[in-house]
Amino acid sequence: GLALYISKDSDYGSRLSKVRTRSAFPVRCINDTLQPYGYQGEYGEFTDERDGTVYKTVDIGDQTWMAENLRYNMWSTPREADPKVGFFYEHWYQAIDTLEATCRSGYICGLPPDAFPRQGICPKGWHLPTKKEFETLLSYARENGTDFNKDLRSIKEWPYRRYGSDIFGFGATATHQRNIVGSDQNNAACYWSASERDESQAWALYPDTTKMELLSKKGNYKMTIRCLMDK
């Protein structure tokens, strides 16, 4: 069997060890009413008719989200998406599916009110979430979860063993946030929104190992995408 071995000796530390089943050890019990880690509900399923990619979906409050990052290849050359990370979309104008000449960094797109919901490069029936829609997600997690900074993050794939609890099934995973010059931060994820802040920045959902927040990021960063179902 397995037993938790705790030692004050720094050379040994705490660990799970194999033990003989006839060994004698003290017992610690855990309250079975505590919130278990990992999503306990059921996922839906959606197929992107553009390329046949199948995505898990999840209902969180009144919203239906893709439970995986978008893996749609918008480029003219073949590319393979990381199944856990999806593709990095290199500019905000790519995410909202508009022309570089009018929406690149340094230009205010000034999308009109009737431009929302903004489908962007999401599949038909889905759209790129706005800052307000991300705020709705965060508010629901804060009001209904057990640990706001963990509840939307995956239980794996985070550095330093700072795993999330993922009780809502959103499963935000550290994705090596990369800017245009290629520097990495492997302790964070970053998701484009459809909302711009000014001529050089757009809003993004930014979970890292210690917090979950909305930040404004430069429009030439590489980020991933989570699509939200149209109502």
Image (tube, rainbow, N blue to C red):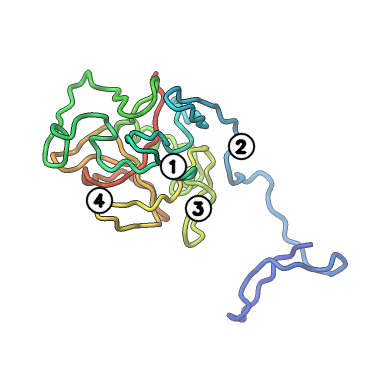
Label 1 crowd (10 A; few <14 / some 14-19 / many >=20): few
- Label 2 or label 4, whichever lies nearer to me, is 4
Q: Nearer the viewer, residue 70 or 112?
A: 70
Q: Name the residue under label 3.
A: 157
Query: Badge 4 is on which residue?
Result: 180
Name the residue carrying label 1: 80
**Mark pair 3, 1: CA separation:** 20 Å
Question: Of the residues under marks 1 and 2, which one precedes in the sequence?
Answer: 2
Above or below, 23 relative to 42: below
- Give the CA separation, mark 1 to mark 2: 31 Å
Choose the circle earlier in sequence order: 4 or 3. Answer: 3
Whether the residues at callouts 2 and 4 have beta carbons within 8 Å, the answer is no
- Alpha-carbon span between mark 4 and mark 1: 19 Å
- What is the C-alpha distance between the residues marked 2 and 4? 38 Å
Compute the Cα span from label 4 to label 3: 23 Å
Disc marking residue 40: 2
Q: Position of residue 143 (x, y in %)?
A: 44, 37
Q: Which of marks 4 and 1 is in front?
A: 1
Question: Which mark lies nearer to you, 1 or 2?
Answer: 1
Confirm whether residue 71 shows in the render: yes
Q: Position of residue 24 (x, y in %)?
A: 83, 69
Residue drawn at x 50%, y 25% is 46
Q: Which amino acid does label 4 sit on?
A: Ile
The local crowd at label 2, few if under 14, some if 14 to 19, many if 20 or more residues have their Cα within 10 Å, is few
Q: Nearer the viewer, mark 4 or mark 3?
A: 4
Tags 4 and 3 touching, CB below 8 Å:
no
Which of disc 1 and disc 3 is earlier in sequence?
1
**Image position of 140 (left or right of 7):** left
**Residue 126, image quadrant:** top left
What whole-number distance in Å separates the C-alpha atoms at marks 3 and 2? Answer: 19 Å
Q: What residue is drawn where x is 40% and y is 20%?
A: 125
